[in-house]
Amino acid sequence: MALIDAYLDAVKAQLPADKRDDIVAELRELILSRFEAKEEDLARPLTEEEQEAILREIGHPLVVAQRYAGGPDSLVGPELYPYWLFAVKAGLLIVGAVQVLGLVVALAGGPQSFGQAIGQAFAGFFEGAFYLGGVITAVAWSMERWGGKPRWMTDWRVRDLHAFTLADPVRWGLTGSVTAGVGDKAATARPAAIRTSPGRWPGSDALFSLIFGGLFVAWWIGAWEWPWGGAFELGDQLVTVSGAPVWTALFAPILALALSHMAVDLLGVLRPDMVRLRAVFAIGLGLASLALAWTILQWGHWFDLTAADGATAQVRGGLHLLRWEALDAIDQAERTLAGQARVLGTVLSFVLAGFGIAQAFAILGDLTKVVRGR
């Protein structure tokens, strides 16, 4: 029974040393009984393929070993999962805040660190998020496996729970849809589509989006100039940033898309109750935004850097830069014109990818609004 021996050896290697012999003996009896029952049904010896089929039914050695070994069968069990999730969210918020603070400090040091500072902030956030998530998961795994919990998880007091309310998005105005409280007749009387937090106007989100859209359009058509001025210092030279032909080619589509977004936002300001209609328009604009982002990503050549001595470099990006090695290379980038171009190309590639992911989730959210009407 070479197959049985090979199978049991694989299971045995995953079992505790003090239990493995008894477990393997029990498992061998189970397998042999299954083989004998099948042979009686077929009235003949089993082929190797049929034996393999029975062993597959019993389960993969890793799964079977875990089943017999006992103990937790997941990294984070259902009891610890809420604590783990809260810790991960809080940790990501802290990592993001630290990186933003570091970015502000770096940029305050002078515009010569612009590209490098943004690149390092992106790389630092992703690296910190992975390390923090790994540490939190490792702590939860050890608690799941060996037991033991900190006192604040078992001996907590209601008076100490105030800090957890800081995680409420409604508290920070990040969402306007809340369930009306008991006895809140005014909230109950309003349509579900426009229920908002107390004291908040239902069209406020659309108004802010309309204002930012107007600023973008004004900048896009040249009526308003970006304070940065399109130049930065690199060493002792001033580097000028100019747009590549992609922006000339896509000038009209981008302007049309921005104006369309403003029209939908204006509808949200005037008629915040027309949730389904706005969601339908938003889905179409979201798909158009995804197509535009994909076109820009595929174009590759986005900006040109020109130094005072006449040297030039192209800021190029694309799918080939959406990998961790590209982020790691930011820290080793040379303080040269070509090095800064590569940093900007990597950062903008991830920004475009993030924009596409955000648009995809926004489309899913709008589809929900179309179905639910709120």
Image (cartoon, grey):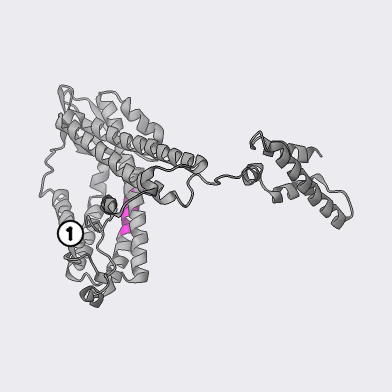
Q: Which residue is drawn at 36% across and 35% down?
A: 127
Closest to the observer: 266 or 128? 128
Expressed as whole percent of the image width and height from the top left, the position of residue 363 reads 35, 59
Left or right: where does residue 291 sit relative to residue 148? left
In the displayed structure, would residue 98 be above or below residue 256? above
Q: In which quarter of the image is the N terminus?
A: top right
Closest to the observer: 119 or 56? 56
Helix, strand or loop under label 1: helix
Expressed as whole percent of the image width and height from the top left, the position of residue 109 reads 15, 29
Say if the magenta span includes residue 360. no
Say if the magenta span includes residue 290. yes
Disc 1 crowd rating (10 Å Cα; few below 14, some 14-19, many 20+) is many
Q: Quadrant of residue 316?
A: top left
Q: Quadrant of residue 7?
A: top right
Tag 1: residue type? Answer: Leu
Q: Residue at x 77, y 41 (%)?
A: 4
Expressed as whole percent of the image width and height from the top left, the position of residue 237 reads 15, 24
